[in-house]
């Protein structure tokens, strides 16, 4: 019987632990690392100086909690040791989480899925005390998932990422998935920040515009939603073509509150990422 990680571990607590470790390490490398928090939406000012004119990289961390499993069914089991875990990614959902993350990566953000290699709050607490939460996590880029699907001619749909302490696969048919060493996440971000001249404000502007242009990265796919699908019963703005208009209204509200264009764009990107479950960190040199 699979163990649902949501019943044994809080996504909020897990994400907090990862965010704080990344933030502390980036600062230890001499970088400015400022997380977006949703309370900023209601503040008159951002409350911090991101330095939008400085070279920098928006960092997006998408936390995933899935299941701890003992058996691999259906289909052939990849080479996995005990314990192993799995979580689901829907690469076909129109304007869904995967498309948001992949488009942000294409437009200049550093983006990582992060998932725990443990499944209980006591294990988490020990890792948190020792600052080992990120070290005990699987890290995968959205672009890597897209590359695996494309190279194997696998269509977009719901796929499972299955992993143990050493290996990771994209399933149903097991395909080896290249991961990022947890210890290298901040090294990679620092390397980019040190090597670019593009102001982070300019990159955030491009990412914001890209949120309304996700069709540009969409692969040809079969229509998934039938007329009697539950999805036709509920109003989903992103599928009704309303999302760009609602996104612009949100930006107008932020600017109407007296914020600069740069601040409003940063809030808009952070708010939309947060609503999908991702943590945005503004990283500058």
Image (cartoon, rainbow, N blue to C red):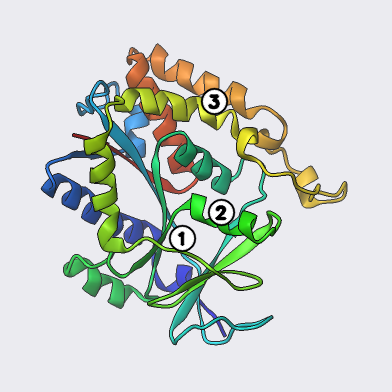
The residue labelled by disc 3 is 247
Q: Work out how far the residue at label 1 is from the one at label 2, CA to CA, in angstroms.
A: 20 Å
**Quadrant of image for the C terminus:** top left
Position in image of residue 246 (x %, y %): 58, 24
What residue is drawn where x is 12% and y is 49%?
28
Residue 100: image location, x then y, percent: 53, 41
Q: Is residue 123 above or below residue 138?
A: below
Q: Residue at x 41, y 12 (%)?
A: 256
Residue bearing mark 1: 64
Q: Please, is residue 124 above or below residue 231 in the view?
A: below
Q: Which type of secondary structure does the marked residue at label 1 adopt? A: loop
Question: Any mark on residue 147, and which?
Answer: 2
Q: How many angstroms separate mark 3 from mark 2 (CA)?
A: 29 Å
Q: Given the current orientation, which residue lies at the most extreme right position?
A: 227
Q: Tell which of 266 and 16 is nearer to you.
A: 266
Q: Kindly identify the residue that appears in the image at 29 percent across and 71 percent down.
A: 124
Mark positioned earlier in the residue sequence (1 or 2): 1
**Distance CA(mark 3)–CA(mark 1):** 25 Å
> Could you say which is closer to the camera, residue 20 or residue 232?
20
Q: Is 49 or 249 nearer to us in this picture?
A: 49
Element class at badge 2: helix
Dot placed on the residue nearer the N-terminal end, 3 or 1: 1
| Residue neighbourhood size for the residue with mark 1, other residues' Cα within 10 Å, grouped as few (<14), some (14–19), many (≥20) | many
Residues at discs 1 and 2 in contact (Cβ within 8 Å):
no
Tag shown at residue 52: none
Q: Earlier in the sequence, mark 3 or mark 2?
A: 2
Residue 148 falls in image quadrant: bottom right
Q: Position of residue 114 (x, y in %)?
A: 40, 59
Quarter of the N terminus within the rendering:
bottom right
Left or right: residue 46 versus residue 257 is left
Above or below, 53 against 154 in this view is above
């Amino acid at each position: 019987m699979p163990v649902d990680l949501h019943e044994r571990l809080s996504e909020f607590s897990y994400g907090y632990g990862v965010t704080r470790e990344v933030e502390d390490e980036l600062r230890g490398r001499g970088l400015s690392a400022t997380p977006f928090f949703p309370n900023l939406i209601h503040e008159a000012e951002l409350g911090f100086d991101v330095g939008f004119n400085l070279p920098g990289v928006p960092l997006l961390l998408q936390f995933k909690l899935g299941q701890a499993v003992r058996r691999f069914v259906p289909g052939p089991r990849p080479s996995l040791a005990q314990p192993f875990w799995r979580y689901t990614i829907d690469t076909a959902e129109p304007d869904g989480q995967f498309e948001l993350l992949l488009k942000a990566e294409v437009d200049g953000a550093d983006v990582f899925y992060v998932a725990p290699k443990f499944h209980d709050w006591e294990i988490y607490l020990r890792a948190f005390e020792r600052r080992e939460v990120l070290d005990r996590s699987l890290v995968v880029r959205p672009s890597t998932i897209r590359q695996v699907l494309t190279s194997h001619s696998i269509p977009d749909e719901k796929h499972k990422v299955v992993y143990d302490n050493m290996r990771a696969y994209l399933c149903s048919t097991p395909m080896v998935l290249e991961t990022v060493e947890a210890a290298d996440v901040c090294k990679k971000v620092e390397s980019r920040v040190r090597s670019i001249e593009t102001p982070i404000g300019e990159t955030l502007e491009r990412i914001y515009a890209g949120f309304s242009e996700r069709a540009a990265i969409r692969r040809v796919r079969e229509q998934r939603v039938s007329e009697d699908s539950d999805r036709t019963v509920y109003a989903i703005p992103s599928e009704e073509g309303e999302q760009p208009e609602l996104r612009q209204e949100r930006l107008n509200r932020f600017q109407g509150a007296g914020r600069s264009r740069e601040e409003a764009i940063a809030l808009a990107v952070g708010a939309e990422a947060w609503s999908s479950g991702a943590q945005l960190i503004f990283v500058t040199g």
